[in-house]
């Protein structure tokens, strides 16, 4: 486990090193934070320390950026990220009910991760699929025309797949 | 000089310099536009929108702090619409601010309060959600209270731009924005150096020193202990401002009298131990010159600088003088030499220090500075705290007779007085080092190159044909710039003075808040405070630390000689690298 983490840190350091020869290297901070989230699923504090040192950016500044953007997770996330679109089209077509059903089934509030670490529930603004509203996104897959019931069934499928 | 351009303010025509903002031009013409997030020493934030003005031909009001003037521009600063908009903006700030002025520490000293009064807020029209966060009281020096914060960002800019400590950020966004250290760490675990400049520039009470006045009042009533107080040079140069006097009035004699009226049994002068610091530091410097330890030597009296050193410059720890600060030296003597002299158990002595500094609270709590397992200084109060105590106790400081500090730790030379201003420690050290090195008395003792508010100052002294190159930096940002030079050219200087605060201790984080018609850390104010100290020096017959008769007695009877075993035990210490490690971005 620790080895895997070291590997990820090495990969991150290489990624940062490649940005540092450019003009205004500090402007790559957001790209680097994306990389961190890609590698770790969230922004662990000790990894932000690594970024601070490697990019020569004070940790307070990194924290300011990391907390400003909703996209960045500051806590560990589950295996699957479930984003419920709360954009206007989805909202009027029942996204609220979908969200309530998912909260109940996964057993968490928005922004939280289920106890089995399988799902993190998030809210999203327009996912660009209004034609099939209401939609949710699980990881990078879009599911449309949902109801509370069909959304719950989707979750059950993922749960089964994880066990199998 | 570039050609003047024409602008109109409130229907009157003026010829002004180009390349300035509306606010700068208006200031010079006598129009004081209300403002909040603006500070002349900091970058333009344009966050508060209080300084809006009307520009003819523009659809919206513009922020005058950020908007440049152009030829032919027609401005209005006080129209009906502007007054209303400004009042609404400030009312909206107040809407998310606690309504507890009468119990707030900044009551009567609050910029937001003054601003609200100046725009005529006499009723409240908005009522919305109010934020609520825990106060951070973890740190021995500074308290952070986000509920009082109006997000002007002055503290963040002060901490990053002037001090280059980068401890604070505006985290999260919108209504949920909070000024905090990285990872929302408690201040005690952050890179905060305790300099207190966030307090100086905060318009409200979002940052405050940890207040020890109630505890001190209680102890002053305890007859079973001996109450001893010391006070720093810069306290006397600034405390008058807290009583409505102009900056730069020397309050030494009246302050000593006020201490006695408050109930202190003995009043000692930190200027005495400044002289002692010089004796030790100058001797240490001469040893280092002979190759006995790392060069250049860097001073160690500023406690914010010491914490900065441990976190940001651990590679330079060996270069820093092992001398404790004058406060801690005097504390050590009070609990040993003086306790013995009055035949009192040091545990029965309450050692109080009145300092211009918030970081001294942190310093006093450092275990590295203990004396036989006891702290040398038990309580540190700032200039602001002692001013409040004097008022609260009903002492009419402006009209009481002047008194002098007590023996044997009360007499000081002029060199001890100038410790409080940037360049002063170096000047004081040179006065004594010169004589120790050459055996001759330095005639020209006022070293002009080391005076004034320039960020980094350099000077040279010839000692028996040897050129000694010195440098002085004040404010941690300037210190960082100077130390970057030192890292690249280790042989450039022999001796370096660093003070953590702008202007040195006179601009300390514990000094009186800016007066109603002034701005925090106003340069004129700092210059006047410095001048008060130079004036004390000029008026003294003894101007070199080694000529101080009480210092001579102390060595004769107790310490034997500078850098002796006793000196090392009581007056010297070592610092160590600390986490979190500070990061200063490259330019």
Image: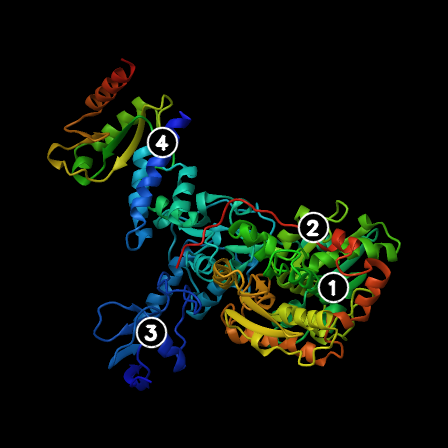
The numbered dot on residue B21 is 3
Between marks 1 and 3, how big is the CA–CA gap? 49 Å
- Report whether A13 appears left or right of B578: left
Q: Which residue is mark 1?
A: B276
Q: Secondary structure at mark 4?
A: helix
Q: In the drawing, does residue B257 fall left or right of residue A18?
A: right
CA neighbours of label 1 inside 10 A, class few (<14), some (14 to 19), many (20+): many
Residue in view at x 43 percent, y 59 percent: B157
Mark 3 vs 4: CB contact within 8 A: no
* Alpha carbons under labels 2 and 3: distance apart: 49 Å
The residue under the point 55% across, 50% down is B314
The mark found on residue A7 in the picture is 4
Say if labels 4 and 1 share a chain: no
Residue sticking out furthest to the top: A164
Of marks 4 and 2, the one in the foreground: 4
Work out whether residue B343 or residue A19 is closer to the camera in this orientation and state it: A19
Per the image, the residue denoted by label 2 is B369
Quick check: can you spot residue A74?
yes
How far apart in space, not on screen, are marks 4 and 2 (Cα)? 43 Å
Circle 1 SS class: helix
Q: Earlier in the sequence, mark 1 or mark 3?
A: 3
Res. B247 in view: no
Disc 2, disc 1: CB below 8 Å?
A: no
Q: Is residue A90 above or below residue B580?
A: above
Label 3 secondary element: loop
Q: Position of residue B87 (x, y in %)?
A: 37, 65
């Amino acid at each position: 486990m620790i080895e895997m983490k070291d590997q990820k840190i090495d990969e991150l350091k290489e990624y940062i090193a490649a940005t540092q020869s450019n003009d205004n290297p500090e402007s790559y901070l957001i790209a680097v934070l994306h990389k961190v989230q890609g590698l770790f699923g969230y922004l662990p504090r000790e990894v932000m320390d690594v970024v601070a040192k490697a990019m020569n950016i004070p940790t307070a500044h990194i924290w300011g950026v990391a907390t400003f953007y909703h996209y960045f997770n500051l806590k560990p996330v589950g295996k699957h990220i479930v984003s419920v679109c709360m954009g206007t089209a989805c909202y009027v077509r029942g996204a609220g009910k979908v969200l309530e059903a998912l909260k109940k089934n996964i057993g968490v509030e928005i922004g939280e991760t289920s106890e089995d670490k399988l799902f993190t529930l998030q809210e999203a603004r327009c996912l660009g699929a209004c034609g099939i509203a209401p939609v949710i996104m699980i990881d990078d897959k879009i599911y449309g025309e949902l109801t509370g019931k069909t959304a719950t069934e989707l979750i059950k499928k993922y749960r089964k797949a994880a066990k199998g | 000089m570039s050609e003047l351009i024409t602008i109109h303010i409130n229907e009157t025509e003026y010829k002004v310099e180009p390349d300035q903002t509306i606010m700068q031009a208006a200031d010079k013409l006598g129009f004081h536009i209300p403002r909040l997030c603006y500070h002349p020493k900091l970058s333009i934030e344009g966050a508060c929108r209080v300084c809006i003005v009307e520009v003819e031909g523009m659809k919206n009001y513009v922020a005058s702090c950020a908007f440049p003037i152009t030829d032919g521009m027609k401005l209005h600063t006080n129209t009906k619409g502007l007054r209303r908009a400004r009042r609404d903006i400030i009312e909206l700030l107040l809407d998310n601010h606690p309504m507890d002025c009468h119990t707030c520490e900044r009551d009567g000293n609050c910029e937001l309060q003054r601003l609200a009064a100046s725009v005529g807020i006499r009723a409240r029209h908005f009522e919305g959600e109010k934020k609520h966060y825990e106060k951070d009281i973890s740190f021995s020096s500074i308290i952070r209270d986000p509920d009082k914060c109006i997000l002007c960002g002055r503290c963040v800019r002060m901490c990053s731009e002037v001090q280059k400590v980068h401890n604070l950020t505006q985290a999260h966004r919108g209504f949920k924005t909070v000024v905090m250290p990285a990872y929302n760490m408690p201040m005690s675990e952050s890179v905060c150096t305790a300099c207190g400049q966030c307090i100086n520039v905060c318009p409200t009470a979002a940052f405050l020193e940890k207040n020890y006045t109630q505890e001190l009042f209680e102890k002053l009533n305890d007859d079973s202990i001996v109450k001893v107080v010391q006070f720093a040079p810069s306290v006397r140069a600034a405390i008058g401002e807290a009583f409505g006097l102009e900056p730069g009035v020397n309050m030494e004699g009246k302050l000593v009298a006020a201490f006695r009226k408050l109930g202190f049994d003995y009043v000692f002068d930190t200027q005495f131990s400044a002289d002692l610091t010089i004796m030790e530091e100058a001797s240490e410097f001469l040893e280092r010159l002979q190759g006995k330890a790392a060069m250049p030597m860097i001073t160690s009296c500023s406690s914010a600088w010491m914490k900065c050193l441990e976190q940001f410059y651990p590679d330079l720890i060996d270069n820093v003088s092992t001398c404790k600060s004058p406060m801690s030296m005097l504390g050590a003597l009070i609990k040993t030499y003086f306790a013995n002299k009055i035949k009192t158990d040091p545990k029965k002595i309450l050692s109080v220090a009145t300092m211009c500094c918030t970081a001294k609270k942190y310093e006093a709590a450092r275990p590295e500075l203990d004396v036989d397992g006891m702290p040398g200084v038990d309580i540190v109060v700032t200039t602001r705290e002692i001013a409040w105590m004097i008022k609260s106790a009903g002492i009419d400081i402006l009209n009481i007779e002047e008194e002098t500090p007590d023996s044997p730790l009360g007499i000081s030379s002029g060199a001890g007085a100038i410790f409080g201003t940037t360049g002063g420690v170096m000047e004081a050290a040179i006065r004594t080092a010169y004589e120790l090195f050459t055996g001759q008395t330095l005639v020209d003792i006022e070293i002009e190159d080391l005076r004034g508010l320039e960020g980094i100052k350099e000077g040279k002294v010839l000692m028996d044909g040897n050129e000694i190159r010195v440098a002085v930096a004040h404010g941690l940002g300037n210190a960082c710039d100077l130390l970057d030079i030192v890292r690249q050219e280790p042989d450039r200087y022999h001796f370096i003075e660093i003070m953590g605060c702008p202007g040195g201790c006179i601009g300390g984080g514990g000094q009186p808040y800016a007066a109603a018609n002034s701005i925090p850390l106003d340069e004129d104010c700092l210059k006047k405070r410095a001048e008060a100290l130079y004036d004390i020096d000029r008026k003294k017959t003894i101007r070199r630390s080694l000529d101080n008769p009480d210092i001579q007695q102390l060595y004769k009877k107790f310490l034997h000689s500078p850098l002796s075993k006793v000196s090392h035990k009581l007056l010297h210490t070592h610092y160590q690298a600390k986490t979190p490690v500070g990061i200063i971005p490259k330019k």
